[in-house]
Every structure is written in structure tokens, then in C-alpha cells.
Amino acid sequence: MENQTALGDDVMTHEEISDQTFEKIRRITAGMLKSDVYKAIYEAALDVEKGIYVDIGPAQGGSTISIALGRQVAGRQDLIYSADVFTASNALKSSDVNTNVRVLQENLAAFGLGEDINIIVVGQQDIATTVPLDAAIGLFFVDADGALDRDFEQFYDRIVPGGIIILDDCENKSTDKYIQYPPDRLEKYVKSKGAKKISELTPLGKHYTVYKFTRKLVDLGLMEEIKTVNNTIFLRKIGGKSYVASGARQALSDTRDSIAREFFEARNAFFDMAG
């Protein structure tokens, strides 16, 4: 039987899903990713052979819709877990959590989707346990706050061998925004994020932190790169070691400290030049 999926009131085959489909996803969800990234996410979901789908940071649903379309066209019925804090993001329509959840649900419905998609409100629900501990993950997408050390601590061992890992905002490009903060503003920034020290955050930018973490995980042999579309990297889980046994926990902690050192070195240089 020919694989097919719903888009609005129409039923579409894989052959009928086009670049316009992904442009529509971006438009309806006010997506922050480019349409070719949504297409690549769809294609990755289409290739999943085993396991559930976990999407961390869907905002208004662009990534979740792309995953769900790929799942349906592939004829698979494994659950999708779509998790977000649903607040404090430029990618969201409102500052109200319930409103943002409703927007996500409406956007899913606009594409004929919603069944077997579990929405998790991070902060109200514990994402690590709401996603069943015994569920194997076939696709793991992350577009959150850059804390991959936390995300992989919770989920790496649950990803199936050969499982697909997609990480947004992965780019060897740092920002000097926080470098230029005066001491009192920097202190307020750290406290506003509920952190005790700058190394707990992303002082050189989320993109740079995700890049450094990703390269370290690749170097440790936990995953291999498939491709990069814009600044979204697609990887595959490899190797048989657990996250802790691989040394990843300590390695990413060291990476955080290294980024903090880079930050303070750049900061000292900036204020020395500024006089």
C-alpha cells in the first residue's frame, strides 16, 4: 500500500510532499529554521527504523510537524514526545504557557496531525521520566538552551544504536555580547538564569557551546556526523559505550570550564583595550 499522510484536508503521498510543504510549515509555525532544514528533519524521520521520536524545543511546532509527516509517510506508529518550556522565547507567540501549547496543537491540527504526539511542558512535567524510561529512541532532536550535557546525560543511553540525533544551532561561531557586559550586569545575567557561575551558561553563545559539545561527543566516538544543513547538524549514534563509561560526563564538564576560560580571557582583553 502506498505510503501517505495528511496535509490540511488533503491526503498526500511522499511524492506529493514538496519544497512548498516545508515552506508552509515554516510560515504557519513562524518557524525559526529554514524550510530546507524542516525538509531534512522530515527525511531523517522517514529513515527511522526503530524507536520513538523525541523533540526538545519545538516552539510552535515546525520540527514536530516535520517529524510527524516523516513518521506517517514511513507508515510507523511509534509515539512522538514534543517537549518545551513554552515560555521566554522569541520563537513563541505569547508569554503564556497554555496559549503556546494551544498554538502548537492548532498548528499540528492544520497539518492533519496530533494523534500519538505527546506534548510535555518542561517545568510542569519531568521530561526525563515523562518520556518512558524503557522506550528506545529512534530520533532525538534538540533545539533548546544549549545544555547538551544535561540532555545527553538524560537521553543518550536510551537512543538506539544507529539512531538519528539532530542538533540545531551548532556553529563554530562565538558572540561577544556577554564579554562586553560590565561586572554588575554580568552578575545580574547569571542570577537571572538561576545559575551560580558563568560556566553553567553559554557565555560565548548557544551556537558555540553546542558546537564544542558536539565535537567532543564525536571525538569520544559516541556519534558520527551525517550532514549539516545551515547550522543544524545531523548525526548517528555509534559505539557501544554508555554515556558515563565513555567519559562524556567529565569531558563535557571540562568543555564547559574551557569555554568559561575563553570567555574570561576575551573579557579581560576587551576591558584592557577599553581602558
Image (cartoon, rainbow, N blue to C red):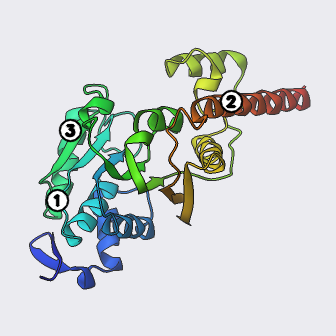
Residue 67, given in percent of the width and then of the height, sits at: 30, 60
Q: Could you tell me how far apart the alpha carbons at marks 2 and 1 are, in whole angstroms?
A: 40 Å
Residue with the mark numbered 3: 99
Residue 84 visible in the displayed image: yes
Residue ID at (54%, 16%): 191
Q: Which amino acid does label 1 sit on?
A: Gln
* Quadrant holding the C terminus: top right
Name the element at disc 3. Answer: helix
Residue with the mark numbered 1: 77
* Quadrant holding the N terminus: bottom left
Q: What residue type is labelled 2?
A: Asp
Residue ID at (39%, 47%): 159
Q: Could you tell me how far apart the alpha carbons at marks 1 and 3 are, in whole angstroms?
A: 28 Å
Q: Could you tell me how far apart the alpha carbons at marks 3 and 2 are, in whole angstroms?
A: 39 Å
Q: Which of 56 and 177 is in front in this view?
A: 56
Name the element at disc 1. Answer: loop
Residue with the mark numbered 2: 254
Residue ID at (64%, 25%): 199
Which of disc 2 and disc 3 is earlier in sequence?
3
Q: Nearer the viewer, residue 9 or 76?
A: 76
Quadrant position of residue 157: top left
Q: Are marks 1 and 3 in contact (CB under 8 Å)?
A: no
Q: What residue type is labelled 3?
A: Thr
Residue 60 visible in the displayed image: no
